[in-house]
Amino acid sequence: MAERAGVSVGTVSNVLNRPDTVGESTRDRVLGAIDALGFVRNESARQLRAGRSRTIGLVVLDIANPFFTDVARGVEEVANAQGLSVILCNTDDEPDKQAAHLDALAEQRVQGVLITPTAEPSPQLASLRRRGVPVVLVDRRAPDAGQCSVAVDDQLGGRLAGEHLLEHGHRRIAFVGGVSGLPQVQERLDGVSAAVRTVCGSDQGLTVIAPESLTVAGGLEAAARIVGIPAARRPTAVVCANDLMALGVLQGMVRHGVRVPDDLAIVGYDDIDFAAAAAVPLTSVRKPRLELGRRATELLLAEARGDGHRHEQQVFGPTLVVRESSMVRRDPTT
Amino acid sequence: MAERAGVSVGTVSNVLNRPDTVGESTRDRVLGAIDALGFVRNESARQLRAGRSRTIGLVVLDIANPFFTDVARGVEEVANAQGLSVILCNTDDEPDKQAAHLDALAEQRVQGVLITPTAEPSPQLASLRRRGVPVVLVDRRAPDAGQCSVAVDDQLGGRLAGEHLLEHGHRRIAFVGGVSGLPQVQERLDGVSAAVRTVCGSDQGLTVIAPESLTVAGGLEAAARIVGIPAARRPTAVVCANDLMALGVLQGMVRHGVRVPDDLAIVGYDDIDFAAAAAVPLTSVRKPRLELGRRATELLLAEARGDGHRHEQQVFGPTLVVRESSMVRRDPTT
DNA sequence: GCCGCGAGATGAAACGTTTCAGAACGTGTG
DNA sequence: CACACGTTCTGAAACGTTTCATCTCGCGGC
């Protein structure tokens, strides 16, 4: 940098980082030069010297899913407060994209990575951990005690949804979602299944529908299949593995002239903002989305700081938010 | 890096960047060492040496708005194909957040910035341009020929929405959105207004409602205000400045027992996926969201490359997608 | 045997910061 | 006056890469 302030580079650095250690007149002179020249500190050089960057990576399954954008808000809030930037990476649940993003994050020497991993195990992720980069799993329980995770008790969430429908007299229930083999989805199904078995003795009344993707389109696909079931055996209620699919199912039902909730009750999962905004407001299992992001980031930063950090698997409790889409009482015998 | 391959650092660099210039046996030895040691190239050092990073910044008004996540997908697609990473920044339409993000991007020496700026002019943005960083405006027309922009003809979009409603017999129309003073919003209003004036001679029949924010909550607020208007003067149709608000209005109407589209027709803007998925599918003005992101990135990269780049203000044409929320014909005399 | 040539490898400079040992200087103390 | 001390600033090293001029070596041609 042009030392137009007539001062050494070390002093400039001090002005920027430890202003109190430099004399007042020098400081003013340097600050003056800085904005006369439009000087902007070079972050690459800082990072090189420091050995790590001032960024963290956030890797999500689907940036178009409002659940993840809300998590991202929580993450950004905490990270920005510490002067860190967030690099947001979208994988679309494709292992290749995830691998590419993780490689890029490793090269950038991020302070840590928050990730909702794809179903398949990732060598890149393992290698990150091996080289000591903090990794926190988001919306997914850590398989071992060797790392932090922030999740929601999805089994409980599934059970809440199931019990709610059972209490309202439903005895034929469909669970929508599952193909991708994500643990989150499986646990939700387990919860519903447990509830059904408790009340009915068996889970005969539970149908599982696994559309191609966990999106609105997947929900539409599921709706078509449900409508195809003969009325006598058709479920009277569905639990969806996320709200996107629930909205798809809802839309599909409207198209087919099936009334919601009268002919079919629907319960979603995540309680994204659009769930309440749907024209038939959606009953959904709420997860503390912002809080999930915030807490994950706190754990990540604690681990990055290092001082005696102990891994923590935090589990939040979901709550059921009842809205119109499930507000109907049925006679269990029909 | 540990020269366990018994070779100079320059050679390692060549193996990584110009493999053909190095002897086969040496290359194998180096590659072997690389993965024996788990070597990962340090991006900061690369960037420092190169004088710029391999990233671009994308700065959006509201990450929770699916319109922007779709744009982001388009951006990522093009950027990743060139080996560039995207840093996604959310401003919530707050100038301070935007300023902080732009400062961070400048320090990171991004190759360029894609931005949908807040309403107020930003000194940080001006300074970026002054120091030669390419900036492309997204979803907003450049005020002068000095920079690239990728936008949609919002005046036309507004007119399409207005004409559609007028053709269906609506004569009292409300426009929802506006407080933030965003040019995009203003142009949409202008379009609606022009259509109304053409048909009715004046825009007396047009009411403007400006909620606090351009979100679902803002739509709910607008709905409450509309319902408060005495039935004789109440609009029979609304055009919303974006789909988020349209969904809010829809939800508010359902709550108040107002039928859509029978009592109130609704037209949204952006045509986000949720618009079609709403239980009363939303008529909306479609913008080519992915294409907007892609094209903006192409322009940015062309400018960054430099070779005789000429600034370009690209304008896409919007199209009206008619769905149920406006499918009703009214007698203009009532 | 000498020269030139090309392929392949080397070594050092440069990028812009931070850090730290120490220089310079003024001031108070014995 | 000599000395210690504190404050303020300097200078140089170090971070890990890329780049480029240069060196080495083997080989073919004369």
Image (cartoon, coloured by chain):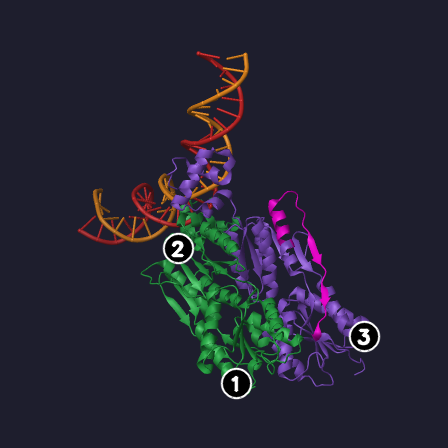
Chain colours: A green, B purple, C red, D orange
Depicted A168 relative to depicted A287: above or below: below
Residue depth check, mark 1 versus mark 3: number of the one nearer the observer:
1
Q: Residue at x 63, y 47 (%)?
A: B302
Q: Position of residue A242 (x, y in %)?
A: 53, 70
A175 vs B321, left or right, is left
Q: Residue at x 56, y 79 (%)?
A: A237
Secondary structure found at label 1: loop
Q: Which residues are magenta?
A: B295-324
10 Å crowding of disc 3: few (<14), some (14-19), many (20+): few
Q: Total marks drawn?
A: 3
Q: Chain of mark 1?
A: A
Q: Chain of mark 2?
A: A
- Pointer 1 residue: A169
Foreground residue, B130 or B264? B264
- Pointer 3 residue: B200
Secondary structure found at label 3: helix
A307 vs D18, left or right, is left
* Disc ID at residue A129: 2
Q: Amino acid under label 1?
A: Gly
Residue A277 makes an appearance in the image = yes
Residue depth check, mark 2 versus mark 1: number of the one nearer the observer:
1
Q: Amino acid under label 3?
A: Cys
10 Å crowding of disc 1: few (<14), some (14-19), many (20+): some
Residue A12 makes an appearance in the image = no
Q: Position of residue A222 (x, y in %)?
A: 59, 70
Residue depth check, mark 2 versus mark 3: number of the one nearer the observer:
2
Alpha-carbon distance for marks 2 and 1? Answer: 48 Å
Alpha-carbon distance for marks 1 and 3? Answer: 55 Å
Task: Find out whether residue B314 is within the magenta segment.
Answer: yes
Q: Amino acid under label 2?
A: Arg
Q: Position of residue B61 (x, y in %)?
A: 58, 64
